[in-house]
Image (cartoon, helix red, strand yellow):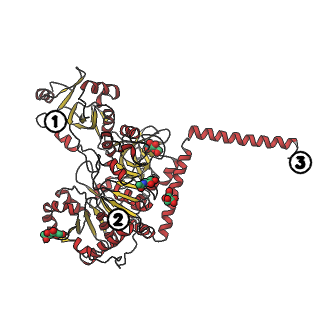
Amino acid sequence: MTGLTARSKSMICWTLSTLLAGVVALWVWQRMFYPYFWIDLIYYLKLQMVGKATMSRMRRGVITYLDRFLLQAGKTPEKPFIVFEEQVFTYRDVDVRSNKFASVFRTEAGFKHGDIVAVWMSNEPDFLCVWFGLCKLGCEVAFLNSNIKPKALRHCFQTCGARALVVGADLISSLDDVLPTLSDSAIDVWVMAENSSNHKVNTLLDKVESASEEKPQIDVPPPKITSNFLFIFTSGTTGLPKAARVSHIKAVMSMAFLRLCGATENDTIYLTLPLYHMAASLLGIGGCIDLGATCVLKKKFSASQFWKDCIKYNVTVFQYIGELCRYLVNQPKTAEEMAHNVRIAAGSGLRADVWKEFSRRFGKIQIREGYGLTEASVGFLNYTAEIGPIGRASYFNKRTIPFEFLKCHLETYEPVRTDTGRCVKVKKGETGLLVAPITFINPFLGYAGNEAMSEKKLLRDVFKKGDVYFNTGDLMMQDHRDFVYFKDRIGDTFRWKGENVATTEVSDVLGCLHFLQEVNVYGVTVPGYEGRAGMAAIVIKEGHDFDGESLYNHLVQNLPAYSWPWFLRVQTSLDMTETFKQQKKKLVEDGFCPQAVQDPLYFLDGSKKTYVQLSQSLYDDIITGKIRL
Ligand SMILES: *[C@@H]1O[C@H](CO)[C@@H](O)[C@H](O)[C@H]1NC(C)=O
Ligand SMILES: *[C@@H]1O[C@H](CO)[C@@H](O)[C@H](O)[C@H]1NC(C)=O
Ligand SMILES: *[C@@H]1O[C@H](CO)[C@@H](O)[C@H](O)[C@H]1NC(C)=O
Ligand SMILES: *[C@@H]1O[C@H](CO)[C@@H](O)[C@H](O)[C@H]1NC(C)=O
């Protein structure tokens, strides 16, 4: 510095301090206006890395879900892939056994490239061997719900156009009801058994034992990645299941789920969700394959076995959906619930009240709550320390998979259109309808055999003429910090006294009451009234009594009057769908007539400020309008 004049010294000082001031200002600005900048950026870079790796693999010819499995099986053949009860299957075991199935399907059943085959099996390792075997022949697979009823089964066959059905050993006895229909439509039925007294079905296991272990020597042309990979049936809130087409690119993108949640190849992933759903087959199993991790597969979820299993199998990650975590929270305390090694719980549908209790009770488990759909690729993932939101709507995330929140009519859920016919985005803090533009990485292949329903999921001319968006039907809110909150799914709302009642909101409020274990809120029709009156099915915690007065006070403090449930139905347990979503349809049909419903019923008596037993005479007075709601 000796050669520097005083003037240039002060110049340097000045520059440095300006620079420093600039950095500090930037830091303050970032803290104040964009506190999640780094977290968002890191997540974005992680997504970019996953995307780059996927593209580079694709250039090397590793394109499909199956390709990714074969790649992993080549890399770590001896690594345990599936642990099921006391059995362990390595990556090679599953590869070899799926070759055997492929060989039988080709030589004995005559399946070929492009055939659609339905798989009707419960969770077991052979579910994957059959599935991958069919993939190896270039067949498209349709997963059937293992609890499906004959009428729906017929419907599923008609919509997806399957030529054959593969039936798991434990479901063979349910086959009798549907076999006549299937043979009428010339559907080949293959059962996972060594023999059968029924000449209308073909057996698989006897043939698989002696089949070739080699990969079938056939040329399956590489598929277009936006073409159909498989069919997954999604149950709507009403009507028969719809066969959603899942593209190859969607399946491959799903495989990044567990990696994005922070799991590694050294994790053991506990999977209790049904494999016929996307969450388990694509996110869970796919996620394991992507990592090269081990999956502990469970035939069925069991709340009482849960932590015992986590210890027995040294589980480090588990996947949940819907109300699964509520079952865990509702279990009596055990020593195991704190003695496990679980570090991540990943999934979707965790409600805020359960979330808090879960974090409090089961130790240091990071919760990775996300949002995703079977039909489209738009999705979110929480990667911050906030409790409640399903993810972030950062600038970066929008760049990766674009989406918008639209202003919509609250009665019809139709987007609001301006005079020129265009839609309007909501402001931050307002609830809007989540839509995502149809793009190369967000293709929408529609529902098989139901073009009208497919078109209904699309919104056209949204911001400009000719653009097309996928309508998720989900209402969300983006707050001022860009966190995204799930508000409501269409069908989970009813109208009462000109207001919209969000059932999830009422459930959440009731769920906080100490004597209630489970709550399911829905709307029932009452003669003489527009819309639906609120009703809640509740389960009372063991060792507690129903307390109408504190329930009433709790509602007064927490909810507007129009959303208070007029009727309560006390049950010993609540019905759930197989994906741990609450069953509402039957409850709505049952209504609140004491003669029709065996469970104890209560009625909100505003004058007494409590809930009273709903007697037959009280019911009559309500129906005839003597008592006004
Ligand atoms: C089918 O095979 C099992 C053994 O795998 C045997 O116990 C059973 O008797 C056989 N049933 C028939 C109908 O042949
Ligand atoms: C997994 O474990 C192996 C062996 O202990 C170790 O070398 C590797 O770094 C681990 N991987 C990760 C991602 O932690
Ligand atoms: C269980 O997993 C943890 C973490 O991966 C590991 O440190 C531990 O050695 C494992 N224990 C057993 C019994 O495998
Ligand atoms: C998000 O993840 C953090 C860090 O694992 C966790 O503490 C928090 O509970 C999660 N919250 C949400 C909303 O996902």
Q: Which residue is mark 1?
A: 599
Can you tell which mark lies on residue 3?
3
Using a 10 Å C-alpha cutoff, classify the residue at mark 3 as few (fewer than 14 neighbours), some (14 to 19) or many (20 or more): few
Q: Nearer the viewer, mark 2 or mark 1?
A: 2
Give the image location of residue 343, x and y in percent.
43, 48
| N-term-proximal mark, 2 vs 1 | 2
CA distance for labels 2 and 1: 47 Å
Q: Quadrant of residue 595?
A: top left
In the foreground, 180 or 439: 180
Left/right placement of residue 385 relative to residue 495 reads right
The amino acid at mark 1 is: Asp
The numbered disc on residue 11 is none
Report the side of 482 relative to 91 (left or right): right
- Using the image, determine if residue 570 lies above or below residue 84: above
Q: Is residue 341 above or below residue 285?
A: above
The amino acid type, in three-letter code, at marker 3 is: Gly
**How many numbered markers are drawn?**
3
As helix, strand or loop, the secondary structure at mark 3 comes to loop
Give the percent coordinates (x, y) of residue 583.
Answer: 24, 44
Residue located beneath label 2 in the image: 89
Please provide percent x and percent y for residue 158: 22, 63
Mark 2 or mark 3: which comes first in sequence? Answer: 3
Q: CA distance from mark 2 to mark 3?
A: 74 Å
Mark 2: few, some, or many residues within 10 Å (few <14, many ≥20)?
some
Residue 490 in the image: above or below residue 501: below
Q: Nearer the viewer, mark 2 or mark 3?
A: 2
